[in-house]
Amino acid sequence: MAIYGAPVAAIAALWWLRSAELIADTSLWTHAIILVVGAIANYTSSLWTRAQPTNPVAIHARVAASVLATGALIYATGWGSLLAVAFAIGSAELLRTVGPATMIPNLIWNFIAVASGELTIELGWAPSVVSPALSHALAITGLILLAIVTRVLGDAATATEAAEDLVRERALHFEALIEHASDLIGVVCSDGTIVSVSPAVTHMLGYEPDEVAGRAISDFVEERFAQHVPEILDLAVERVGVPTSYEFRARHADGSERLVVGTLTTPTADWGDHIVLNLHDVTTQRDLETQLRHDASHDALTGLMNRKAFGDASERACARAARQGRTVGMLYIDLDGFKQINDTFGHDAGDRVLIEAGRRLRTCLTDGETLARLGGDEFAVLVDAVSGNRAIELAECILSTIGEPIEGLPNDARVVASIGIALRSSDGIEISTLMQDADAAMYAAKRNGRARWELNEPIIEV
């Protein structure tokens, strides 16, 4: 409408101005030709610059079409230099729509248009409502002002374009970060409705972003945490700019749960009831921490408690027994025949014996009894509270179980156990003394024929 309607409106305005003798007596056909040719040139050149926005020839053509059409029209009215503001308006529009690349072409083609117009006045080819001398003076002044205005507007357009490019570049970087971040980033309303989430939700929880948007956040968290979601969201809205983190379990699409750390932040007060949500999956990290803690206190081969952890547990048990006046017992177990199997059949067979021995020892234990591998083929059992003949019953169970054939080894390749038993119930029970006594009893069992137990001192009834 602007392209085709403007010339018609302009012809009507020119006809009225001509009738009122406010412009020169130039033929309306001349005005019409200038308007139509100018409109076509402007439209064609604008298509060219849209297709090739950085082509200098296209930019010059776009500027030339606009400036020369403007110059031809205002000089045809006789008001030429008096309407220099029209050139400034055209320059500003070109800088806005095409960009700062039009600044120099604007200065060049405005100079050409004004100089050509003044030349036609001087030669008497174009009308002028003022004398040629005054028109030239006004034209020179107008060109100077036009150059200043064009330069200022060009610098402003350059700065604006640079700022837009920077914003655009940062936006692309930010989108790339969101797109490829392993953490889930999203926006939720204060009522718990999820507005949007990043693609990381697919890897973390097995959902597509569109499946999550519009649903309640409580649909994806464990029930006990879901009960606190409203108050947590209210707190996040109140504490503008202050991130708050919580650890909870999120529901995966496959029915499993993932341990995550969720951080909620209301960046500024302008966000209203919207909150930024960040979810970091710590499932693997926590599993690894648990595994490391387990490995630090357990034997890698048998999975039993190791010597250090057993010593710590025994110290605590002895301290409790001393406070409560109870009897604590220890069984020190050494596998007889293990070295021969290890040397004859290899370390793989030896490892298999140790693993099987650990499994069999576990089957003999009850509550309050702690089993450990002390190293090599030595094991120990701590009985937290000895009752009756439990220590001897446990030793008999171990002797019976350990002596059974081990699958994968020849029938004559067996191990037996020498077991030393130590009991203490004084006020000052020390783990070092208890273990030394049990160890001494174990060597007594070896000297007395192996495959037996020996008691360091008489059993104390409780």
Image (spheres, grey):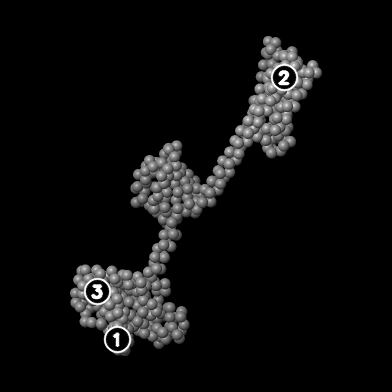
Q: Of circles 1 and 2, which is in front?
A: 2
Q: Position of residue 279 (x, y in %)?
A: 44, 51
Q: Of circles 3 and 1, which is in front?
A: 3
Q: Residues within 10 Å of mark 2 (few under 14, many from 20)?
A: some
Q: Nearer the viewer, residue 134 or 17?
A: 134
Q: Position of residue 235 (x, y in %)?
A: 37, 43
Left or right: residue 206 versus residue 388 is right
Quadrant (top left, top right, bottom left, bottom right) of the C terminus: bottom left
Q: Residue type at mark 1: give it.
A: Ala
Q: Residue type at mark 2: give it.
A: Ala
Question: Is label 1 in a helix, a strand or a loop?
Answer: helix
Question: Is label 2 in a helix, a strand or a loop?
Answer: helix
Which residue ends up furthest to the top in the rendered image? 20
Q: Residue type at mark 3: give it.
A: Ile
Q: Which mark is residue 429?
A: 3
Q: Nearer the viewer, residue 91 or 226?
A: 91
Left or right: residue 295 versus residue 101 is left
Residue drawn at point x = 71 percent, y = 38 percent = 55
Mark toward the start of the polypeptide (3 vs 1)? 3
For residue 84, which quarter of the picture? top right
Q: Position of residue 248 (x, y in %)?
A: 39, 53
Residue drawn at point x = 45 percent, y = 53 percent = 280
Find disc 2 in the rendering and name its residue: 137
Marks 1 and 2, how far apart in space? 127 Å
Marks 3 and 1, how far apart in space? 22 Å
Q: Is residue 187 above or below residue 368?
A: above
Marks 2 and 3, how far apart in space? 115 Å
Find disc 1 in the rendering and name its residue: 444
Left or right: residue 158 versus residue 118 is left
